[in-house]
Image (cartoon, helix red, strand yellow):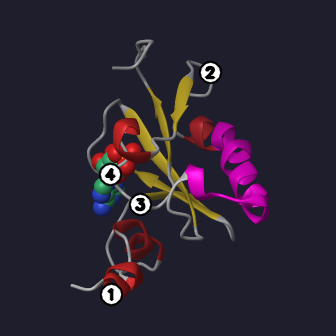
Amino acid sequence: MDNQLLMSEKTIFEKIIDREIPAELVYEDELIVAFKDVNPKAPVHILIIPRKAIPRVAEANEEDQQVLGRILCKAGEIADKAGVKESGFRLVINNGKDGGESVPHLHCHLLGGRPLEWPPG
Ligand code: AMP
């Protein structure tokens, strides 16, 4: 497969945004989409992603400020709907190999529903 083809391939998250594969959506607006993680690491595990295909936070730029702000500003509302606003939750963005990133479409994990350890492994 050549690089051009690889670069034009949709990630699994773009396919979710385009409704080509199913996901349990919990929130969406014109900038972001949130859905349940298929392999949850906590009782509540939601991924909040930009509609725009920003590969990872290290590649975000000035023009992405609004969408990145939206992810944080909506996290409380999404956590509230999921029942963890009062008990607490954690937001995590993995970036690159050592950061544990496995899908090259920026995503913010919202985890809650149990006490989360610190520091993470
Ligand atoms: P990361 O390791 O930070 O890149 O996180 C990727 C996350 O995407 C993992 O927690 C996966 O369980 C999750 N994931 C992968 N495929 C899907 C899918 N089809 N629907 C929902 N979550 C997914």
Left or right, 80 with reference to 24: right
Q: CA distance from mark 3 to mark 4?
A: 6 Å
- Asked whether mark 4 lies closer than 8 Å to ligand 1, one says yes
Which class describes the residues within 10 Å of circle 4: few (<14), some (14-19), or many (20+)? Answer: few
Mark carried by residue 5: 1
Residue 83, can we see it?
no
Q: Are marks 3 and 4 in contact (CB under 8 Å)?
A: no
Task: Please give the name of the residue rendered at 71% of the width and 59% of the height, measured from the top-left corner.
Answer: 61
Q: Nearer the viewer, mark 4 or mark 2?
A: 4
The residue nearer to you, when weighing 67 against 18, is 67
Label 3 CA crowd tier, 10 Å (few <14, some 14–19, many 20+): some
> In whole angstroms, how far apart are the C-alphas of marks 1 and 2?
46 Å
Span highlighted in magenta in the image: 57-77
- SS label for mark 1: helix
Residue 41 falls in which quadrant of the image?
top left
Asked whether 62 falls inside the magenta stretch, the response is yes
Residue receiving disc 2 = 86
The residue located at (21%, 84%) in the rendering is 1
Determine which residue is flagged by label 3.
Answer: 104
6 w.r.t. 76: above or below: below
